[in-house]
Image: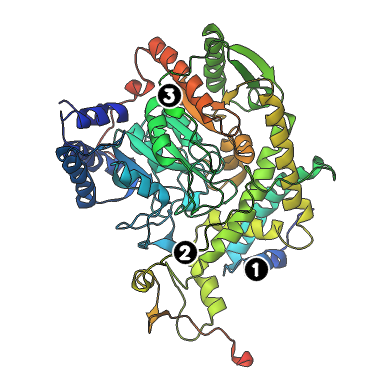
Amino acid sequence: MPALDRDDVAHLARLSRLQLSDAELDHFGEQLDVILSAVARVAEVAADDVPPTTHAVPVVNVTRPDVIVACLPREDVLAGAPAAEDDRFRVPRILDEEEQ
Amino acid sequence: MSDLTLLGAAETAAVVAGGDVSAREVATAHLDRIEQTDEVVHAFLHVDRDLTLTQADAVDQARADGSPLGPLAGVPLALKDVFTMKGAPTTCGSKILQGWRPPYDATVVERLSAGGVVVLGKTNMDEFAMGSSTENSAYGVTRNPWNLSRIPGGSSGGSSAAVAARQAPLAIGTDTGGSIRQPAAVTGIVGVKPTYGGVSRYGLVAFSSSLDQGGPLARSVLDAALLHEVMAGHDPKDATSINAPVPPVVAAARGELGGVEGMKVGVVSQLQGEGYQPGVQARFDETVALLTSLGAEVVEVSCPSFEYALPAYYLISPSECSSNLARFDGMRYGLRDGDNGENGVEQVMAITRATGFGPEVKRRIMLGTYALSAGYYDAYYGQAQKVRTLIRRDFEAAYAKVDVLVSPTTPTVAFPIGERADDPIAMYKADLATLPSSLYGGPAMSLPAGLGDDNLPVGVQLMAAVQRDEQVYRVGAALETALEERWGGPLLDQIPELVLGAST
């Protein structure tokens, strides 16, 4: 099925939030093609009647008592942030010019 | 007391508990060894002498006060840099987390601390545990102490190298597709991936959540078991943690559950022969013969779906990775790049992730993004999950007939640094034999089986059914005793002396 062209790889990079150079797009494109061709072998087995396995050891409905517990101290968390302001994470603008 | 770095974990705990040496002396000996050797091995990303000695002093104080000491109190340990620990950075081998100091301890770290285990520092690893050579670290390669031009395995390569180089008697690694067992095999030590859910993942930075599992690396089966027991057990903070007693791994390692006589051992047809180096196959065949001579009943078992473990794994783990690593967006922790007042948040995220992640992580994120996209999901991710069911069925059918399964741990001995660095498929094949039990979730151990090609260590893999971790320790301990009798001591006694001050 694979054979990714440059546009496909650029689209994947965009979905993955990775700003890649043209050289990187070409290099990864080739490698992803080889990997995808190799892993496509999973289509050879496992018919429709085989159920999927999502976890090795399934456990269901795991809950904890509905008790309020302390969260991490704000200053400890913000100490690891790339930028903080007014006791909050400072982030770049979230809307493009035309959306504002 | 002679060189304290020669002692195993059980012996170290005994001499500390007996008052022959202090935990501070033990810690100092290992810190000095790291200082002398890590310039050439590069197992550690972070060592903090003061923090280490503070932990050691607490053990000495507890002993002086007559407080009860845990079974590993005063024993130094090297911690893979994928677990959070307060007071030290956690980088996961990635630039995107450079200098990040987590505000909380992993559950595993809390348990080490409660048990008086002395953490020496954080070890190098393939970025976010993706790799089989530790070459994918953003902070340089780690070298195999057996031969400095070879890889120490990965992704827990800093942990394996530290134990093999006597920088620490114990280390903790994580295993998603073989990242404890493969490094243990190629450095001649013992490594165990516990049953999935046996060890808490709280504070373990996630790569592939349905597969990631922490576990011990050590120089003997008993030492691994002692650490396994300290680390393991139910944790309400991890929803996938198994709420059941820890299997009796220490009793099994001490031989208290019996030897291998009368046990049924299955040799997996699909995990040997073609693709396995002659030296690896030879040591494996000898190990199987040894099991027979020890009274085990050995049969060949066919697991046809194992052939599809590699493709299934390289769909499932990148898919989970692409989702898990979305959290590294440069907003709440770690690196932020491109925040110049002009760029919007989406651009800053894309620039940050391009700067912060290395090539293998980028490859896997894109691979996973592809496999999970509309139109491809059924053919890739959905199909891989069905293969996972077939692999589980092969294991269940096998364990209806045998107690443990055996195979070589890796197809080859440690390969040269650089050989597979930009050849993903060749690199992925290093995990050929370890992937099936990762997808199934059962426990698996790598045990030194001798020296193979180029006089480098070969590992044999012992696998057991889910929650039967004691079985791999039981067989591992019996084999270890018989093998060491044959070798005249542990395999690590044959490691060449490190050539210091001559980094290649």
Q: Please tell me which residue lies in front, B182 or B221.
A: B221
C-alpha span from label 3 to label 1 = 51 Å
Quarter location, residue B64: top left
Classify residue B471 as left or right of residue B45: right
Tell me if mark 2 has few (under 14), some (14-19) or many (20+) residues whose alpha carbon lies within 10 angstroms of its own.
many
Amino acid type indicated by mark 3: Ala
C-alpha span from label 2 to label 3 = 45 Å
Q: Nearer the viewer, mark 2 or mark 3?
A: 3
Q: Which residue carries the number 2 mark?
A: B356
Amino acid type indicated by mark 2: Gly
A82 w.r.t. A99: above or below: above
The chain ID associated with circle 1 is: A
The residue depicted at 50 percent of the width and 65 percent of the height is: B328
Quarter of the image for the N terminus of chain B: give it: top left
Model colouring: rainbow
Classify residue A69 as left or right of residue A7: left
Amino acid type indicated by mark 1: Leu
Q: Please tell me which residue lies in front, B397 or A43.
A: B397
Q: Position of residue B103 (x, y in %)?
A: 36, 63
B434 w.r.t. B276: above or below: below
Q: Which residue carries the number 1 mark?
A: A15
C-alpha span from label 2 to label 1 = 17 Å
Q: Earlier in the sequence, mark 2 or mark 3?
A: 3
The residue depicted at 72 percent of the width and 62 percent of the height is: B373
The answer to whether one can see residue B307 in this image is: no
The answer to whether one can see residue B244 in this image is: yes
Q: Position of residue A97 (x, y in %)?
A: 59, 91
Numbered disc 1: secondary structure? helix
